[in-house]
Image (cartoon, grey):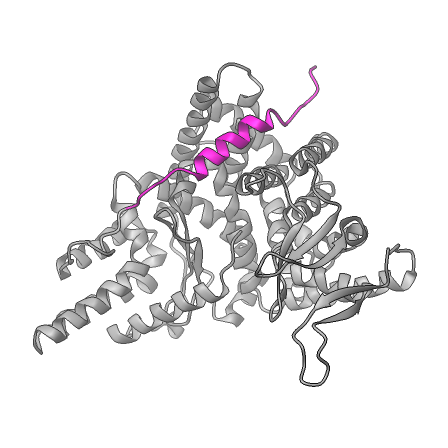
Amino acid sequence: MKPYAPLGDFTRILEKTRSALDQGQQVPDPFGQGAQAADLDYYRSLVADGRRLLPTRYHADYLDILDFAIRQAASDLERGGPARHAAIMRQLQSVFATLAAPLVQLADPRWSRRLRAYQAVISNFYRRFLDDRHIRYQMTHVARWPELDPLGYFLNTGSGPFTLAPSRELPLAFVAKPASYACFAPLFFIEAHEVGGHVFHSAVAGLEEEIESRLNKRLSERFSVGDLVFFRKTVRVPKRPGLIFRRDHKYVQNTVFVSHVWRTWLPELLSDLAGVLNMGPAYLNGLITFLTALEPTLSLRTVSRFDLDQGISSHPPSLVRARFCLSVVSRLDFPDRAVWKESLDRRINLAAGTAPADLVWHDGSGNRAVSYKLDELLQVLEDVVDTVLDTSFAALGDRSLASIMTWGKSDELTARKLADALLEGSVDADEPVEARHVVAASILALEIASTRGGSRAQFEKSSDAVHGNALELLSALYTEQCLLCEVPAFQGTRRHDLSLSELARLVERLREDSARFSTTF
């Protein structure tokens, strides 16, 4: 039997990914500049579309809020003059421009299938954690309503991405991504990080704080053993000059610096951990390709950002993220794990190329602010992975993340079977699969297609077939979800009586918070 070889031609796959990311896509935007002013009947039609196209769990706590805003606007328009009427319609437009984008795109035949597929992915990553009773309980402590999956929609080229957090008044999150992502199913893997990671971790009360505390303790214990090798004892870090001490830098102990760096990176690494637990080795495969495609140098990097006020960036350099995920993959139990580990290790080295041996943080002017040897920082990588993957946490009911969910034998074999089906167009919608399996399979299918030789045109044809078949299957999964979606709600804590002006201010605040706190993948 021919040995299993999961990876193919990286150059071809990288070119395809870059091409997908560079596509200029325009989504319908009836509320943008230059758009014809909408009347109340149009807003009513959008809410009606939502009741027809969205799972019923969204009706009371999303569509009813929009419907109330329309009814209040209609009542207010019965009084006052043209200036007042114009102000009311501007408020309504501002609310719908942000909150109703999913309805516009679901109702548009050009975008409906793509958004249904994307929504199936978001819901699967979100609800995979939510099936756990203890996690559902913990999520209620931070004013999240676990019945409502985040709603996704696409943005015109040059916009986003961003996430609007849930609030007590509007209890669901909105996840917005550039429209180019909708044209390449393998890019949906990103939601294993964003929704499966960030949305989940931030919604479970006390989880990130507990993990950070455990990590700090673990690293302190490791440092006390004295077996780590450091080139120097201190690290030079920039700071703002004080009134008395005018130096523009300070010296930090090695162990203090290393511990601080890993704790700062923790939220992003936890989200990458969730990505691997949701999609297995395919997540790391997609991550390597995506992060490489984003770089002008077409390589994984060892650089990041430093700010005098914020310190080092919470986003680890792409090479560190890849190494972290490889360590997680190597600890899971699935077929051909050793082959995957060796193959992904080679892929990382190929993508890294001649990346410098030093980690470098640049300031806002592009100057080197801090530098540190990569191999010295990675000395504690396994300690970090041990802590986040296998430690039991009270916030999770005294369980570890690995015990709550993982990528196992059935997941891996399902993804492999689906990969062949996506290539051949023989997808059976009745097979028991999840959206995450489909996304993982689309990444595997590209690798298979890249090994078949042939012209670039033939590879493009195979890639397009994978994308189209994946969208078809994901869209079918969304339709099933709409039929089986009645979930009880915490009706006693709901508010459907927001005035139009209150709702407009809420949307403005959510957008401001998104701009302030959202970060790039």
Given the current orientation, which residue lies at the most extreme right position? 226
Q: Which residues are magenta?
A: 1-27
- Can residue 415 be seen? yes
Please name the residue shown 43% across and 31% down the image.
467
Q: Is residue 262 left or right of residue 67?
A: right
Please name the residue shown 44% across and 53% down the image.
161
Please name the residue shown 57% across and 43% down the image.
291
Residue 255 falls inside the magenta stretch: no
Given the current orientation, which residue lies at the most extreme front position? 246
Question: Looking at the image, is 420 positioned above or below residue 172?
Answer: above
Question: Looking at the image, is 361 positioned above or below residue 139?
Answer: above
> For the N terminus, which image quadrant?
top right
| Residue 234 in the image, given as x and y percentages of width and height | 82, 65
Q: Is residue 77 left or right of residue 513?
A: left
| Residue 323 in the image, given as x and y percentages of width and height | 70, 44
Q: Is residue 244 left or right of residue 142?
A: right
Which one is nearer the viewer's eye here, 146 or 24?
24
Q: How many marks?
A: 0
Which one is nearer the viewer's eye here, 364 or 16?
364
| Residue 25 in the image, given as x and y percentages of width and height | 34, 41
- Can residue 499 be seen? no
Question: Looking at the image, is 454 positioned above or below residue 280?
Answer: above
Which one is nearer the viewer's eye here, 485 or 124?
124
Which one is nearer the viewer's eye here, 496 or 330?
330
Q: Is residue 217 left or right of residue 83?
A: right
Please name the residue shown 46% across and 17% down the image.
458
| Residue 11 in the image, given as x and y percentages of width and height | 57, 27
